[in-house]
Image: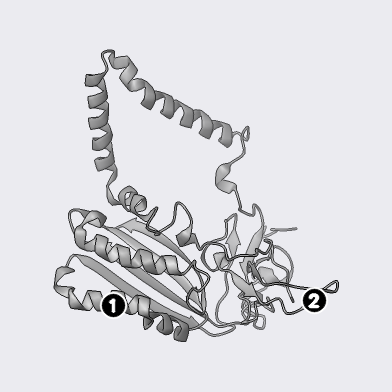
């Protein structure tokens, strides 16, 4: 292997960010994510106020009714204060690389990290939203969601779609309060994306949508597809956990030998240290010649010095 990744390899494929607890759209956890993102802050405050009122009316001593909320709030204030003053480790920095520049190098078909920007990359953004007063809990959106959950689950299976590299997802609310979900996935090529889109799993969802299209006026979908040739993409992460293309994984075929023993198949991370040397420049991370901007770096840019 030409380059050595920052993270250790794994014997089995790690879950995509969309497949991890807290980000997942799997059937087991995805519904909780939908509920969490579905309501506005004022709605959650109203729900909490109603629950607190019920507790006050149920418990004879009203002071006891407020204890759970008060204790939880106090705990969180103390916890945040201890973290702020460095008296407790910051859990939000877990798995990040503080004060270090990192970059992701896409491996070749054999799972070898050869050089930055040396491979083609295709990206698809798939978006879904519910334009319904029930939001993501609207029946027609939940049906769409089940198909999305099934397709996302397929990415984490051993026999997942060919050319799939990894996926993450985000949610936001538009100006009307509707929640939008966006799934960002990375592939070897547009051809790999089309092969998945025309496979049995996606075509089943596609066929259902077309046959029942009159029922989906309140469900919004979109996709955008881009393909970048070698030398036309790069990335950089600062104080960040693996995400985006940095959270993709690659199967190293393991057809070489180390100390006389055969190297088995393993899943490798693409993350490299870009704190020092030429990889601090965008052109080097693309794998192209220097540009006029390489020498025009801001003063004090001393990561890794």
**Is the image coloured rainbow, by chain, by secondary structure, or in one colour?**
one colour
Q: Quadrant of residue 145?
A: bottom left
Q: Residues within 10 Å of mark 1 (few under 14, many from 20)?
A: some
Which numbered disc covers residue 193?
A: none
Direction from residue 116 to residue 171 in the image, left or right: left
On the rendered image, what quadrant is the N terminus found in?
Answer: bottom right
Q: Is residue 288 above or below residue 16?
A: below
Question: Looking at the image, which residue is at 26% across and 56% down?
Answer: 136
Q: Position of residue 54 (x, y in %)?
A: 23, 26
Q: Is residue 255 above or below residue 33?
A: below
Could you tell me which secondary element the residue under label 1 belongs to?
helix
Could you tell me which secondary element the residue under label 2 belongs to?
strand
Q: Looking at this rendering, what residue extends furthest in the right direction? A: 259
Question: Looking at the image, which residue is at 50% across and 79% down?
Answer: 162
Question: Looking at the image, which residue is at 47% across and 52% down?
Answer: 21
Please give the residue where the numbered disc 1 appears in the rendered image. Answer: 206
Q: Residues within 10 Å of mark 2 (few under 14, many from 20)?
A: few
Please give the residue where the numbered disc 2 appears in the rendered image. Answer: 257
Q: Is residue 79 above or below residue 190?
A: above
């Amino acid at each position: 292997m030409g380059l050595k990744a920052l993270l250790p390899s794994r014997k089995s494929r790690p879950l995509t960010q969309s497949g991890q607890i807290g980000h997942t759209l799997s059937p087991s956890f995805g519904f909780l994510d939908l509920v969490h993102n579905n309501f506005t802050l004022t709605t959650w405050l109203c729900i909490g106020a109603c629950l607190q009122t019920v507790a006050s009316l149920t418990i004879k001593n009203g002071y006891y009714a407020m204890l759970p909320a008060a204790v939880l709030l106090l705990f969180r204030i103390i916890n945040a204060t201890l973290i702020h003053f460095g008296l407790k480790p910051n859990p939000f920095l877990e798995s990040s690389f503080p004060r270090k520049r990192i970059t992701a190098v896409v491996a070749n078909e054999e799972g070898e990290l050869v050089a930055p920007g040396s491979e083609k990359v295709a990206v698809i953004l798939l978006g879904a939203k519910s334009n319904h007063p029930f939001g993501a809990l609207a029946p027609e959106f939940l049906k769409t969601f089940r198909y999305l959950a099934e397709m996302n689950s397929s990415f984490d299976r051993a026999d997942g779609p060919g050319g799939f590299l990894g996926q993450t997802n985000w949610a936001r609310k538009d100006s009307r309060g509707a929640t939008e979900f966006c799934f960002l996935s990375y592939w070897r090529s547009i051809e790999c994306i089309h092969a998945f889109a025309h496979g049995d799993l996606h075509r089943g969802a596609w066929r259902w949508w077309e046959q029942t299209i009159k029922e989906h006026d309140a469900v919004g979908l979109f996709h955008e597809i881009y393909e970048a040739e070698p030398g036309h993409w790069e990335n950089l992460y600062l104080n960040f956990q693996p995400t985006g293309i940095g959270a993709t994984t690659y199967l190293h075929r393991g057809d070489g030998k180390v100390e006389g023993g055969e190297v088995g198949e393993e899943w490798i991370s693409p993350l490299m240290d870009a704190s020092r040397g030429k990889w601090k420049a965008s052109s080097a991370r693309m794998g192209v010649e220097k540009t006029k901007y390489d020498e025009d770096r801001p003063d004090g840019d001393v990561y890794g010095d």
